Every structure is written in C-alpha cells, then in structure tokens.
Image: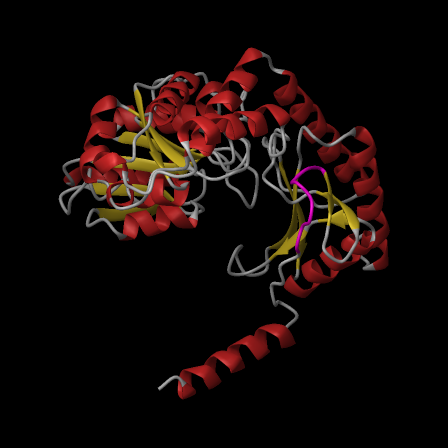
C-alpha cells in the first residue's frame, strides 16, 4: 500500500534537494548560548536562536530545575484536572499574571497548544475572528479549529483592520488577533491603535507575545508595555521557550473568566500532560531574575541597536524592526541558502528563510540578537556578513 506514495514522496524530496532548498538540521553538542559547538567539531557564534535574554543555560534556572527534581519529581504523568497540578504550576501561573498585569493564567505544553486551544471554547459560528495576515501558524491553525467567521487584514494595516471590523459587525462577538512581534519581519503590532479600533467597534483583543515578551518594552513586558496599555488586552499568549529560559511550555493569560472557561473546555489543556515540575520551577525563578533588575533587557536593546545600525551602514537591506529580530533581505531562496552556508564557514550560525515560511520572493537571513552576545560577537558577525555579501554580489 505504501509503494505509490513512497515514490511520490521520494520525488518531492528529490525536487527539494535539486532546488537547493532541503532543510538539514545541524546538531549542537553544547548548551544553547551565544557560542556553541556542533557535532562536526566546529565552534560557531549562534545568531538564529530565540534565546533573547541569554537565559537558556543560566545557572540559576538550572539550579531551580535540579532542586525541584528532588522535591517534586520528574514528571506528572497526568493532565491538570485529574492529578497533574502541583504547587509549582500554580506559582508560575501567578507570576506570569503579575508580570503581564493580567488577572489569571493557564499553562500549556507549548504556545502552539495555547493558540490552538483558545478560540473554540470561546467562540461559535455566531462570532468573528479578525486576524493579521502575518500571524503565526499556530494562530492560523487555532482559527481553523473554530467555527467562528474569519476575517483577515493586511499586516499591521489599521485601515484594513477597520474595514474588516465593519464587515464583522453582524456577528455576535468579535476578537482581533495579532502577533506582538511578527517573527519573520521583526515589526511590532501597533497595539495602541488596535485597542482604539477594538473599543470603537466593540471587539476583544488577543496578542501572541512569543517574540515580544522579554524583548519589547523598557522592562521586557511586551507590546502592552511598549504602547502603555497594560491590562487593556483581553488575552495574551506566550511561551517559556524563547526569551523566558528557552525550554518548553506555553501560557494564556488574561481576563479571569476567559482563563476559567479555558480550564473547563480547552482541549490541549484537558488532554495533554502538565509541563514537568522542573520547567515550572525554572520558569518561576526566571521571572524573579528578570523582575529584579533590567540588566539583560538593557543589554539586548543595546545589542539590537548596534547590530541593525551597523548592517544598514554596510549597505544591507534590513526590514524595519523594533524587536530583537533583524531580517536581512536577499529575496532569492537559493541565495539565502548559499549565504547562510558561507556564513557558517565563517563561524556564524544563521538560517536562510524562504517560501513557504515567508512569501515567495521574500527570502532572507533572519538574525536574532541576544543579551548573551558581546560586542566582539556582533563585530565578527557584521564583518562576516560584509565578506560574504561581497563574495555573492549582494554588496557592491
């Protein structure tokens, strides 16, 4: 039975390789950090991790995880409402709500689950979801699982959003959904304008803070801090897998009634194991660390400003950004792969992105800055970009 589809898949894989677009995974043999070693013996500088605050190998988080392994065990072997809730889970939920200025929080195995499980319990075919065109795949999949009417507006385009809100007035409830930072471009959603439109057209607001939490805003509390609207967003989703320690685990935080109905009806929550105690304990310690002082956020913001300015001065085409993501535009898919490969030879670890991850003709190298990067790391990367850029005729 497998024969025909096997031949089809082999053909598909061969075509991907022939086009030079095959995705190969490079294996890291050290902890995640700015400096890493690969299994081929190469030492490289990592500029493509979501380790924005450099916490992935922080000794305090490792200690918190080790300590709770002894006191609470390895795993829960159950979902939350049966026998999978420990005090460490409750503590983490409270700290997340406090950090974002919300009323309550619910934990998930990943933010993909948080986004996949948020819409269906809240909305029916009588309602409407108005979604940004560049929202993450997890939001798109979550919307598909819900029977609500779907509207789509151009990325961060407030005129188009208003038009879609006008169309959605015939529905019972409406919710505007947006990424806080759009992961491929690095631009930030204009939350102040979105909230004004939501108030004008009687809509709720949901924001995915995966790439903005810990990064955007003076103290890293995300786009609601940046636009001075803490507490005005109804639903925030996010992850512990990026700036917040880099492990795994997602969350939804917001209005208490919304969180409570998710506990009762959200399928990824009801039918998936609790996150391990070690992850919850390390997450709690992480929030203590980044709330005590602003050193990591300040360092990240300084690194981002320096790198972006230097790359622009060198002549690269850089997408406008207000985050720790720097999209170096190359436009050609094959070129993005060749560019990334040559950077690897220079000891710079990056990834080229192309369709379907980004629109056709919009291929790029996505550089992700970290508080763990030193000025020497940044200078080495900039010089490598310039060298390869000249070799491949990207720079003249």
Q: Residue at x 27, y 42 (%)?
A: 129
Residue 370 within the segment the image draws in magenta: no
Image coords of residue 334 (percent x, y): 68, 65
Q: Quadrant of residue 103?
A: top left
**Going by the image, does 358 lie left or right of 136?**
right
Name the foreground residue: 254 vs 357: 254
User: Is residue 33 found inside the magenta-colored segment of the image?
Assistant: yes
Q: Quadrant of the N terminus?
A: bottom left
Q: Is residue 122 left or right of residue 318?
A: left
- Could you say which is closer to the camera, residue 19 or residue 130? 19
Give the percent coordinates (x, y) of residue 346: 83, 51
305 shown above or below 34: above
Residue 23 or residue 174, whichever sits in front: 23
Residue at 75% in and 29% down? 306
Query: Which residues are the magenta region?
Result: 27-34
Q: In this view, which residue lies farthest toward the front? A: 70
Residue 301 location, quadrant: top right
Q: Position of residue 163 (x, y in %)?
A: 31, 40
Q: Is residue 359 above or below residue 4?
A: above
The residue at the point 85 percent across, 54 percent down is 390
Relative to residue 289, is residue 310 depicted above or below? below
């Amino acid at each position: 039975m497998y024969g025909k589809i096997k031949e089809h898949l082999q053909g598909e894989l061969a075509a991907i390789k022939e086009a030079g677009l095959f995705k190969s995974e490079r294996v890291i043999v050290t902890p995640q950090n700015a400096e890493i070693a690969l299994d081929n013996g190469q030492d490289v500088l990592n500029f493509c991790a979501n380790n924005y605050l450099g916490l992935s190998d922080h000794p305090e988080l490792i200690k918190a995880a080790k300590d709770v392994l002894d006191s609470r065990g390895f795993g829960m072997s159950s979902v939350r409402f049966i026998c999978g809730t420990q005090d460490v889970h409750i503590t983490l939920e409270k700290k997340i709500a406090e950090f974002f200025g919300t009323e309550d929080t619910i934990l998930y195995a990943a933010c993909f689950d948080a986004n996949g499980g948020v819409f269906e319990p809240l909305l029916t075919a009588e309602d409407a979801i108005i979604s940004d065109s560049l929202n993450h795949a997890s939001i798109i999949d979550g919307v598909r699982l819900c029977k609500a009417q779907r509207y789509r507006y151009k990325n961060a385009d407030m005129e188009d959003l208003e038009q879609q809100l006008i169309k959605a007035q015939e529905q019972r409830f409406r919710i505007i959904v947006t990424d806080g930072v759009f992961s491929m471009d690095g631009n930030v959603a204009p939350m102040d304008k979105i909230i004004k439109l939501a108030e004008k057209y009687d809509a709720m607001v949901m924001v995915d803070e995966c790439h903005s939490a810990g990064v955007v805003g003076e103290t890293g509390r995300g786009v609601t801090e940046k636009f001075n609207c803490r507490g005005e967003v109804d639903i925030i989703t996010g992850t512990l897998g990026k700036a917040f320690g880099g492990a795994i685990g997602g969350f939804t935080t917001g209005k208490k009634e919304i969180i409570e109905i998710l506990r009762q009806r959200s399928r990824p929550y009801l039918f998936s194991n609790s996150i391990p105690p070690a992850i919850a304990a390390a997450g709690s310690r992480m929030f203590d660390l980044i709330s005590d002082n602003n050193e990591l956020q300040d360092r990240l913001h300084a690194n981002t400003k320096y790198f972006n300015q230097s790359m622009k001065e060198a002549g690269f085409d850089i997408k406008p950004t207000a985050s720790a993501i720097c999209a170096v535009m190359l436009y050609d898919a094959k070129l993005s792969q060749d560019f990334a490969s040559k950077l690897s030879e220079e000891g710079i670890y990056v990834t080229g992105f192309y369709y379907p991850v980004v629109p056709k003709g919009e291929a790029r190298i996505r550089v992700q800055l970290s508080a763990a990067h030193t000025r020497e790391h940044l200078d080495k990367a900039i010089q490598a970009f310039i060298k390869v850029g000249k070799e491949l005729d990207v720079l003249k």
